[in-house]
Image (spheres, grey):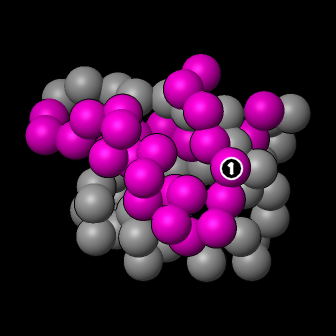
Amino acid sequence: MKTLQFKTNINCGGCIKSVTPALNQEAGAGNWQVDTANPDKILTVNSDKLTAEQVVQAVEQAGFRIQVA
């Protein structure tokens, strides 16, 4: 299992709720989390199959900014 980390602008529970369907579809429920307490709002994804590009695309389609940390 590899761990991917990204800086995002997902900064509250409402934002997490908005991006949950896209990330659950790509990574699977329980395989990702957002540290909203971190100033960079770090999204961590654990997956054997996803690439950073796939995660970026899913988050951007949900309407949020993201970049590889």
Q: Is residue 28 visible?
A: yes
* 26 to 1, vertically: above or below: below
Region rendered in magenta: 40-69
Instruction: Please name the residue shown 61% across and 78% down the image.
Output: 18
Q: Is residue 42 visible?
A: no
Residue 63 included in the magenta stretch of the image:
yes
Residue assigned mark 1: 65
Q: Residue at x 22, y 41 (%)?
A: 50
- What residue appears at the point 18 percent right and 29 percent down from the top-left corner? 1
Residue displayed at 28% across by 60% down: 26
Question: Which kind of residue does numbered mark 1 sit on?
Answer: Arg
Where does the image place residue 46, in percent across and percent down from the top left? Answer: 31, 38
Residue 4 relative to residue 20: left or right = left
* Front residue of 26 and 30: 26
Q: Residue furthest right?
A: 39
Q: Is residue 37 above or below residue 14?
A: above
